[in-house]
Amino acid sequence: MTQRDSRGRLPAAYRRLWWASAVDNVGDGAAAAAVPLLTVMISRDPVLVSLVSASSYLPWLLLSLPTGALVDRSDRTALMWRSQALQAAIVTVVAVLIWLGWIDIAALAVMGFGLSACEVVFATASLAVLPDLVPDALLHRANANQYTIANAGRLFIGPPLGSVLFGAGAALPFGVDAGSFALSAVLLAKLPRRPRTRTVQPPLRAAVAEGVRWLAGHRLLRTLAGLLAVNTFCFQLGNVTLVLLATETLHVGGRGYGLLLAGAAVGSVLGGVVNARVLAKIGALPALLTSLIANVVIFVLIGAGPNAVVLGALLGCNGFATTLGSVVTVSLRQQVVPAQLRGRVHSVYRMLGWGLMPLGSLAGGLVADAFGIRAAYPVAGALRGIALLVALPAIVSAMRAARTCD
């Protein structure tokens, strides 16, 4: 499936994947703005708001490991388009429930869990299939393009659209999301298929264990996985009550909240656009370290933001730093992990990295309830700083080794 081009052009199959991501993420962005607004219409209890968010991340903890083994022994393209088709069906049902006035917190939590379960399959398969579509020399650019279009749709285009549609009718953003999933599934179904191998597959437990052992044996990747676990826990700890910080503390309306999320997306999109230039200038691991330090400082400052303009600017800076670091770590995994282990190693990495997000959501709700809405972000920033100090020796060691190789 690997397609090479001496002129450095990304292949046609990758462009189809890019368009599927573009369509899907616009719909996701619309729903991402609508879900918190719908949640606070039903209840303004921080704990209940955090429960909806926690349900959306729980599948990463429960399903990541078996999904990785499934991806390594199945047709990855088929898994991708089928998971998107199922997501379209789930969101369609929710849109109908909203239209009928039968929606509640429990239904939103079930929707979040179902969509996230499909996303575990889709994300693991897409990370594993990308190196089959793109040569190694173009991985950084391909991943940067993916992050750029994902952030543009999910954070920049989608949220304002979702906020406007929500104002016209609460079910409309979910209808758009369902349509985007369906169109994405059609595009993905036409991707080239991975040739099937007739090798005897090990039992599921043994297959999962092989991926765990490989990651555990790679010092830098296991350190980054552990650091990601703390960082995503802290991201959710702060971010779960962002809608309350914006609407109650800073008195931003529904449309303003969508624009606030769009402000965060500007930084994320810019991070994807300039990523290749930054990496060429300072190197991958120095760029990663810079992004991690910036995330710590920004989280501490968000809690003290005096108004929505400052909050939007800080969220934009955080988006830039996060995208920069994410492209580095994703490309690193795709380059060093053997092809036959990509699904399992990616799933172990994601389980460690995203598995604590439900706990982060709950912790954020509890911190906000006990100490106030503003308290969550500074607490999260302090925890991120401590984790970075612990991980620093392994990152610095890898940076020095990279300089030696150069």
Image: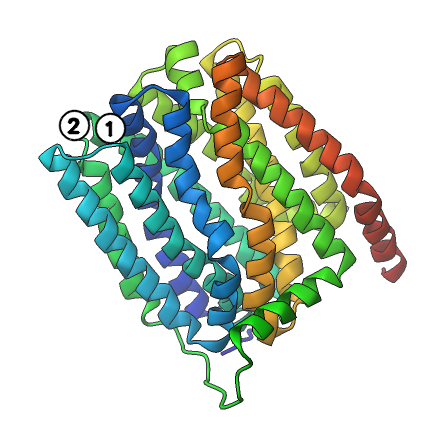
**Residue, disc 1:** 164
**Residue depicted at 41% across the width and 35% down the height:** 53
Closer to the camera in the image, 213 or 314: 213
Q: Position of residue 48 (x, y in %)?
A: 37, 27
Q: Position of residue 202 (x, y in %)?
A: 56, 81
**Residue, disc 2:** 168
Relative to residue 370, is residue 123 depicted above or below? Answer: below
Q: Which mark is residue 273?
A: none
Quadrant of the rendered structure where residue 291 is? Answer: top right
**Residue depicted at 79% across the width and 39% down the height:** 390
Quadrant of the rendered structure where residue 101 is? Answer: top left
Query: Which part of the image, by quadrant, shows the C terminus?
Result: bottom right
Q: Tell me if residue 22 can be seen.
A: yes
Q: CA distance from mark 1 to mark 2?
A: 7 Å
Report the residue that reaches farthest toward the left. 100
Relative to residue 212, is residue 31 depicted above or below? Answer: above
Q: CB atoms at circles 1 and 2 under 8 Å apart? A: yes
Q: Judge left or right: residue 223 versus residue 311.
A: right
What crowding class fits label 2: few (fewer than 14 Cα within 10 Å), some (14-19), or many (20 or more)?
A: few
Relative to residue 293, is residue 224 depicted above or below? Answer: below
Q: Classify mark 1: helix, strand or loop.
A: helix
Relative to residue 71, is residue 42 depicted above or below? Answer: above
Task: Tell me the kind of residue under disc 2.
Answer: Ala
